[in-house]
Amino acid sequence: MRRLSVTCLAAVALGCGGARDVPSEPGGHHHAHAMHRRFENPEQWAGEFDAPERDAWQEPDRVIEALALPPTSTVADLGAGTGYFSVRLARALPEGRVLALDIEPSMVRYLADRAQREGLSNLIAVESTATDAGLREPVDLVLVVDTYHHIEDRSAYFGRVREHLRADGRLAIVDFRLDSERGPPREHKIAPETVRAELGSAGYRLIEQHDFLADQYVLVFGVAP
């Protein structure tokens, strides 16, 4: 797999930060189609990923509320980008820890600087790779927003992620509905049924589904017995 920014589905829909006129881009792929895009200029992408208008359709606070995280949770934000979700999670969990994972070294540096600049000592930037999320400790939740369709060989990838989930840990996938005008081109979007099948083969089971987002689905998985 080429290096791509698991930075949050990024530009695709401003996947991690944007609007529907965003450049089309990488979608994840299981075995057939994967979109690849680099996100090497964090300051430039921050204008899109963290654009205030994104809040209206991404509803980040509502997503975090729906996850009902205990205050001492350790959360991994996979494909953190410029920290759109990571920063909110860190503020919502002052007694917990947030691992902001991204494949782009420049994004990781940006995240570390942002955490320091905003006084978020519980936000830790971590560099990942195309095949390794970068987890080195047990976590309570792995959050994957606008990034799932960027990842190749997802069953194997998330099988490795599962090894770092606590026994009652969860994996939450937020990605674009097939009929949404936002996000990557339709052929690169991943249907929720496909996500369930892929993660089922990786040792997960669906435990929750939320449908309050107009453009996206929210699927929450636990580790299968």
Image (tube, rainbow, N blue to C red):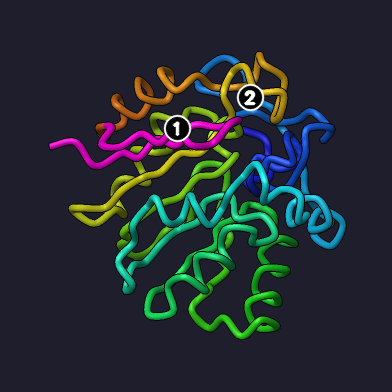
Q: Nearer the viewer, mark 2 or mark 1?
A: 1
Residue at numbered disc 2: 34
Q: Residue at x 39, y 29 (%)?
A: 155
The residue located at (50%, 19%) in the rendering is 191
Residue type, mark 1 in image: Asp
Of the residues under marks 2 and 1, which one precedes in the sequence? Answer: 2
Left-right relation of 13 to 60? right
Above or below, 109 relative to 101 = below
Label of residue 211 in the image: 1
Relative horizontal placement of residue 101, taking residue 42 as reference (left or right): left
Q: Secondary structure at mark 2?
A: loop
Amino acid type, callout 2: Ala
Q: Please give the name of the residue rendered at 69% of the width and 27% of the height, measured from the top-left corner.
A: 35
Relative image position of residue 117 (x, y in whole percent): 70, 83
In which quadrant is the C terminus drawn? top left
Judging depth in this view, the residue of 110 and 189 nearest the camera is 189
User: 184 or 159, which lies in front?
Assistant: 184
Q: Is residue 43 left or right of residue 161?
A: right
Instruction: Specify start and end residues of the magenta stretch as a single range.
Output: 206-225
Q: Is residue 187 magenta?
A: no
Neighbour tally class for label 2: few under 14, some 14-19, many 20 plus, Cα within 10 Å: many
Position of residue 110 relative to residue 76, above or below, is below
Q: Main secondary structure of the magenta part?
A: strand
Horizontal side of 101 relative to 143 (left or right) equals: right
Find numbered disc 1 in the image and state the secondary structure of the residue it sits on: loop
